[in-house]
Image (tube, rainbow, N blue to C red):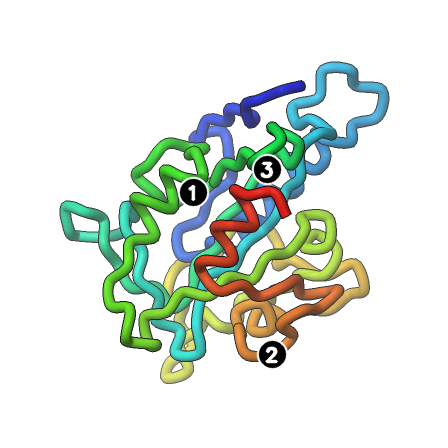
Amino acid sequence: MPTSPPQITLSTLTYTACYCEENVYLLCRKLVCDKHPENDKDSLASSDFKIYAVFISNKNETIPLFRQRASLQDNGFIIWDYHVILVYTQPMYDKEKKKSWVYDLDTTLDFPCDFETYAREALIDVNNDDESFERLYRVIPAETFLEVFASDRSHMINSDDGTWMSPPPLYPPILSSKGTRMNLPLFIDMMENKDSKDYGKVFQEGEFIEYFTSKR
């Protein structure tokens, strides 16, 4: 059974700064397609693994992360309104635990990074008593994310003058399989759709780490 994730060079991926949800969408599509290729015996992703898109946010949209390339601090500390990563996990790693890796296209850590290392280095507690910095995690199976997600990028348009807050991707906006044009806010919102067929399940941080490291 494979015990390592696909090794992908960042430079080979389509990446647009400040559009982490779309960057992860494209990576999900690549890994899912490689997981289920037609007549391909040397697929990049193994069927023994599961792939998830993970949105990180909270009700205030103020989540602290470390080891982020956009940071100006040595430890990579930054406050995002939300962030999106991909988790690649091997549920049958051994009798006691799962083995998981994080693909974060904005981290200074390894790509991919061992899940436990990422949790230790990027998900450092900043204030346990301040809910405004609480990190919540919406976990969506990659296949579901690829079916449901849509973004017309309107959240990145300045309401004052109509300019882009950050240049958009060069490819067309992503539509859902049903033709939905925009549902990104439903993925970011951690207070609604907490256990949803379309929008995944919301975890508190301890639950999230346990979900991807421990047998259940």
Q: Residue furthest bottom?
A: 160
Q: Residue furthest left?
A: 74
Residue located 53% across and 66% down the image: 153
Where is mark 3, residue-wise?
Answer: 89
Number of numbered callouts drawn: 3
Q: Nearer the viewer, residue 210 or 175?
A: 210
Q: Earlier in the sequence, mark 3 or mark 1?
A: 3
Q: Secondary structure at mark 3?
A: strand
Q: Residue 202 in the image: state x and y as whole percent.
A: 57, 66
Q: Secondary structure at mark 1?
A: loop
Q: Quadrant of residue 156?
A: bottom left
**Amino acid, disc 3:** Thr
**Mark 3 near mark 1, Cβ–Cβ under 8 Å?**
no
Where is mark 1, residue-wise?
Answer: 105
Distance, label 3 to label 1, CA atoms, is 17 Å
Where is mark 2, residue-wise?
Answer: 192
Distance, label 2 to label 1, CA atoms, is 27 Å
